[in-house]
Image: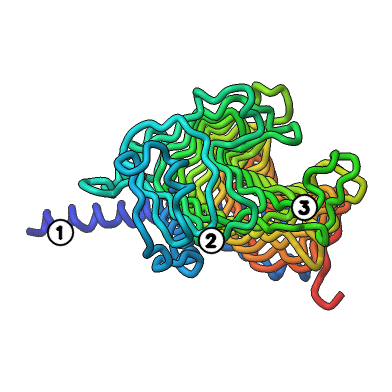
């Protein structure tokens, strides 16, 4: 027993000695990290009063799966007040049982009617009427969710079995989308549950092009669709002006000349493999883009700068909430001013609200989320509570006279600094977290201005937490 006690005491002593060495080492490392951080902060160019307001917490981003779950729940909550589920209680017009073609059934339908399409492939280009619901047949196991290759979202079986195909469209159909809408249609016009594919190639950089789904001067609901492999942007939205048919040089692109708004709901679709943007918002359009998965949309074959997964320009103000955006070579979500057009230019800034989206692995050329000459003090671009992983360059970039609010975002693993303000204004830069950036966590430079900066954290980056180089950060009380 005495021998056992001596051995036990000796073992315990060794354990305590090793633990003491570990604690001392950890303490030394903590001291070294604290000293390094203090020196970097002192040389950062950020006012000491502002540094005192930042967080020193260790940044632990949620897993990709956790972030996607947060995003989709936000989209589901947002959409609930936007769709009238009790409106369509009129007739059921069934294709092909009662009508040989989908368009024939749409033409015969009245507002409140439902056109039900049974499984099959339909080689048509459609035009939707106001108040009509177009839905794939849900009988049997039609609403059973099925996996889609390359996607995290699942879609109903009826979506994958009911296909609208444009591969037989001829040259005379140039400028038409797979589905167009009468100008002025509202949210009681619904397209629910179709694969929409093979719109012939059109250069979406040239005015007059079509999108697979053309929300021109229309505000329908597009939901549970699989928009893939089209030769232009997957879903495009913009207003219709009063002089829509005039030659471009004489057009008036001011807000007062808008004749039909474009404020649709684009919910829970998969948009992939299109030669253009996944979802594009132009000319004052303000759709709600909610809970979609947008990936592998690539227009590099057109020989111009690659387009993002979701884009907004020409005064658009979409609400972009809870989407999953990945593997688009032109970046995740981009807002910009747009090229000058017409005799009277756009007179409102592009000003999307971009909230609780998950953006990851969108090529090496563009930021995860960015703003280029967009927003104003009255209508700022808003980046709120997004998750950005493994951006090829910066996670969030605001530049070139943009005016933005950037709050509550998590940026992980960027190929350069995490969040950059360059020659732009951040009205608020608060409560953001950056980890693992290949550069500083936050970089303000080239005349960038930050008016409010609190609660930001940066951890484990290849560079200082904060760098203000040639920019202005307003301290409290100034």
Of labels 1 and 3, the one closer to you: 3
| Position above or below: 316 against 171 | below
For disc 3, the marked residue is: 241
Q: CA distance from mark 2 to mark 1?
A: 81 Å
At numbered mark 1, what does the secondary structure look like: helix, strand or loop? helix
**Do callouts 1 and 3 mark residues in contact (Cβ within 8 Å)?**
no
Please state the horizontal and vertical placement of residue 278, each as a whole percent of the image.
Answer: 57, 39
Which residue does the image show at 31% across and 37% down from the upper left? 119
The tag on residue 5 is 1
Which residue does the image show at 71% across and 52% down from the upper left? 239
Of labels 2 and 1, the one closer to you: 2
Please state the horizontal and vertical placement of residue 4, each as a whole percent of the image.
Answer: 12, 55
The tag on residue 187 is 2
> Which comes before the other along the chain, label 2 or label 1?
1
Residue 392 visible: no
Q: CA distance from mark 1 to mark 3?
A: 92 Å
At numbered mark 2, what does the secondary structure look like: helix, strand or loop? loop
**Do callouts 3 and 2 mark residues in contact (Cβ within 8 Å)?**
no
At numbered mark 3, what does the secondary structure look like: helix, strand or loop? strand
| 330 and 240: which is toward the camera | 240
| 288 and 7: which is toward the camera | 288
Which residue does the image show at 18% across and 53% down from the upper left? 7
Q: Residue furthest right?
A: 343
Q: CA distance from mark 3 to mark 2?
A: 20 Å
Please state the horizontal and vertical placement of residue 373, each as a whole percent of the image.
Answer: 81, 50
Determine whether, in the image, residue 444 is placed left or right of residue 11: right
Label 1, residues with CA under 10 Å away: few <14, some 14-19, many ≥20: few
Which residue does the image show at 90% across and 43% down from the upper left? 250
> Which comes before the other along the chain, label 3 or label 2?
2
| Position above or below: 403 against 125 | below
Please state the horizontal and vertical placement of residue 460, each as a whole percent of the image.
Answer: 58, 48
């Amino acid at each position: 027993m005495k021998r056992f006690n001596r051995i036990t005491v000796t073992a315990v002593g060794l354990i305590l000695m090793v633990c003491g060495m570990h604690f001392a080492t950890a303490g030394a490392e903590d001291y070294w990290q604290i000293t390094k951080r203090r020196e970097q902060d002192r040389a950062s160019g950020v006012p000491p009063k502002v540094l005192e307001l930042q967080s020193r917490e260790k940044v632990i981003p949620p897993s990709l799966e956790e972030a996607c779950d947060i995003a989709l729940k936000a989209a589901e909550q947002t959409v609930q007040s936007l769709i009238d589920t009790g409106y369509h209680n009129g007739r059921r017009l069934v294709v092909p049982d009662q009508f040989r073609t989908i368009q024939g059934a749409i033409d015969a339908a009245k507002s409140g009617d439902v056109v039900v399409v049974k499984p099959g492939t339909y080689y048509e280009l459609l035009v939707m009427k106001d108040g009509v619901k177009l839905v794939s047949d849900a009988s049997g196991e039609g609403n059973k969710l099925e996996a889609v290759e390359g996607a995290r979202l699942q879609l109903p079986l009826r979506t994958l079995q009911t296909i609208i195909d444009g591969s037989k469209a001829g040259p005379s159909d140039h400028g038409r989308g797979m589905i167009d809408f009468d100008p002025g249609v509202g949210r009681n016009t619904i397209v629910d549950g179709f694969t929409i594919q093979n719109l012939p190639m059109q250069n979406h950089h040239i005015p007059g092009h079509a999108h697979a789904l053309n929300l021109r001067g229309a505000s329908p609901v597009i939901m549970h669709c699989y928009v893939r492999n089209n030769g232009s942007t997957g879903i495009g939205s913009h207003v219709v002006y009063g002089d829509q048919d005039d030659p471009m040089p004489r057009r008036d692109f001011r807000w007062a000349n808008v004749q039909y708004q474009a404020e649709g709901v684009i919910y829970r679709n998969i948009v992939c493999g299109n030669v253009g943007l996944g979802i594009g918002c132009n000319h004052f359009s303000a759709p709600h883009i909610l809970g979609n998965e947008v990936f592998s949309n690539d227009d590099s074959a057109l020989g111009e700068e690659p387009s993002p997964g979701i884009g907004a320009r020409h005064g658009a103000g979409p609400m972009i909430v809870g989407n999953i955006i990945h593997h688009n070579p032109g970046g995740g979500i981009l807002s910009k001013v747009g090229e000058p057009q017409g005799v009277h230019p756009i007179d409102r800034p592009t000003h999307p609200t971009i909230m609780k989206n998950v953006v990851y692995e969108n090529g090496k050329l563009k930021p995860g989320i960015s703003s280029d000459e967009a927003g104003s003090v009255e209508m700022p671009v808003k980046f709120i509570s997004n998750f950005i992983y493994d951006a090829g360059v910066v996670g969030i970039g605001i530049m070139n006279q943009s005016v933005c609010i950037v709050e509550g975002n998590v940026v992980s693993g960027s190929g350069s600094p995490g969040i950059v303000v360059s020659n732009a204004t951040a009205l608020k830069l608060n409560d953001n977290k950056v980890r693992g950036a290949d550069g500083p966590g936050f970089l303000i430079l080239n005349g960038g201005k930050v008016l409010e900066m609190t609660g930001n954290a940066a951890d484990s980056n290849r560079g200082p937490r904060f760098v203000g180089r040639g920019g202005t950060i307003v301290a409290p009380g100034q």
